[in-house]
Image: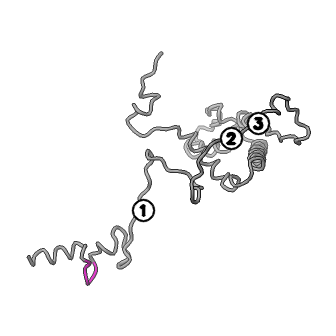
């Protein structure tokens, strides 16, 4: 069965649409790796491996410490939304994706450390290859550390605050509560438009 383009193509979708889950994961990981990006490549990879191992260990430990049928988050959400008047366990109606077993399975894997370089078994044909660095033009100036905001994403507007009357919504130039109006303000325009 073929799906219409509105279901899978961004160009056919009426509103902004992108893979929010992937975008959020990448942005979260980038914020963690801000300091690691300045490290040499091997040290950066070690940092990533240590960080992932630490996260997996913490979450696995938290999952083993819980005594509920479902994850802690799912338990809290159920208590917020469902009334316990019927005295039936709400976890019986919860999806298996929020169960304790699924939580265990998610973090049961281990992030293995890289062995010492002396113990590596590198084939001769790979060892004899010479890898050149990519031809990349390095731009002058300080490189951007934080994420680039794409054109498809709206940026929250900053509210302006007047330095004269301290009210929000206008600035000093357009302030109406001033005794001496600025030449660009509405008060100035009203006062001197009648003179002509």
Vertical relation: 52 (above or below) 6 = below
Q: Residues within 10 Å of mark 1 (few under 14, many from 20)?
A: few
Vertical relation: 159 (above or below) 115 = below
Question: What number of labels is visible?
Answer: 3
Q: Residues within 10 Å of mark 2 (few under 14, many from 20)?
A: many
Q: Closest to the observer: 29 or 128?
A: 128
The reply to whether the magenta stretch includes residue 141 is no
Closer mark to the observer between disc 2 and disc 3: 3
Residue with the mark numbered 1: 158
**Alpha carbons under labels 3 and 1: distance apart:** 52 Å
7 left or right of 117? left
Range of magenta residues? 177-182
Image coordinates for residue 102, horizontal then vertical, percent: 71, 33
Vertical relation: 78 (above or below) 172 = above
44 left or right of 158? right
Residue with the mark numbered 2: 71
Closer mark to the observer between disc 3 and disc 1: 3
The reply to whether the magenta stretch includes residue 181 is yes
Tell me the element at label 2: loop
Q: Toward which corner of the image does residue 71 lie, by quadrant?
A: top right
**Alpha carbons under labels 2 and 3: distance apart:** 50 Å
């Amino acid at each position: 069965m073929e799906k219409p383009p509105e279901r899978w193509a961004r160009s056919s979708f009426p509103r902004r649409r992108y893979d929010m889950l992937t975008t959020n994961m990448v942005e979260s990981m980038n914020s963690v790796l801000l300091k690691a990006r300045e490290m040499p490549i091997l040290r950066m990879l070690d940092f990533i491996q240590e960080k992932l191992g630490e996260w997996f260990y913490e979450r696995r430990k938290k999952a083993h410490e819980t005594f509920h049928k479902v994850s802690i988050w799912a338990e809290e959400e159920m208590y917020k939304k469902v009334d316990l008047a019927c005295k039936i366990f709400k976890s019986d109606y919860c999806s298996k994706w929020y169960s304790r077993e699924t939580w265990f399975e998610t973090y049961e894997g281990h992030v293995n450390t890289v062995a010492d370089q002396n113990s590596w078994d590198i084939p001769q044909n790979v060892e004899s290859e010479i890898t050149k660095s990519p031809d990349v033009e390095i731009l002058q100036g300080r490189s951007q550390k934080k994420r680039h905001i794409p054109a498809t994403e709206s940026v929250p507007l900053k509210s302006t605050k007047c330095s004269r009357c301290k009210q929000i919504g206008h600035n000093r130039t357009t302030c109406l509560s001033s005794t001496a109006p600025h030449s660009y303000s509405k008060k100035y325009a009203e006062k001197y438009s009648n003179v002509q």
